[in-house]
Amino acid sequence: MIELSGRQKRALRALGQTTPVALTVGKSGLSDELLRDADAIIERVELLKIRLPSMDRHDRGPLAQRISDALNADLVGVVGHTVLLYRPASDPDKRRITVE
């Protein structure tokens, strides 16, 4: 994980506006299968948008952080029921997003 500056997070959130939701966490919560799918997707696209279930807003932040930690990704932001995560591709030749 890299430490993103405020400017970098703003740029990624701007990109996230047009990024479709790739995964939805069900009422049963996090599963190993969901995390495997999320890991495969974020490796491919680098910027991952996940929809969280209806829950108390105070519980969404910790859940988003757990997902971020499990994926070794940076938590760009949590807005409403949506989490935005960033992790650069492990292969530098396959990186799509440049964060400066």
Image (cartoon, rainbow, N blue to C red):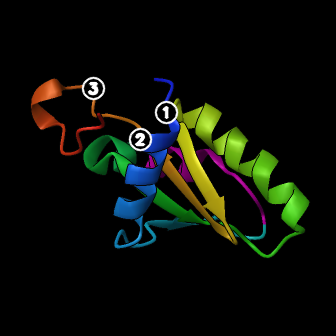
Q: Secondary structure at mark 2?
A: helix
Question: Residue 76, position in %: x, y?
Answer: 54, 47
Question: Residue 28, position in %: x, y?
Answer: 78, 64
Determine contact: label 1, label 2, CB under 8 Å.
yes
Question: Residue 84, position in %: x, y?
Answer: 52, 55
Instruction: Name the magenta segment's main secondary structure.
Output: helix
> As rendered, which of 100 and 38 lies closer to the eye?
100
- Mark pair 3, 1: CA separation: 20 Å
Which residue is tagged 1? 5
> Which amino acid, mark 1?
Ser
The nearer-to-camera label among 2 and 3 is 2
Residue drawn 56% across the image and 53% down it: 34
Q: Secondary structure at mark 3?
A: loop
Which residue is tagged 2? 8
Which residue is tagged 3? 90
Residue drawn 23% across the image and 39% down it: 98
> Which amino acid, mark 3?
Ser
Q: Which residues are magenta?
A: 28-38
Q: Is residue 8 magenta?
A: no
Q: In terms of sequence position, does the residue under pointer 3 or pointer 1 come before the other?
A: 1
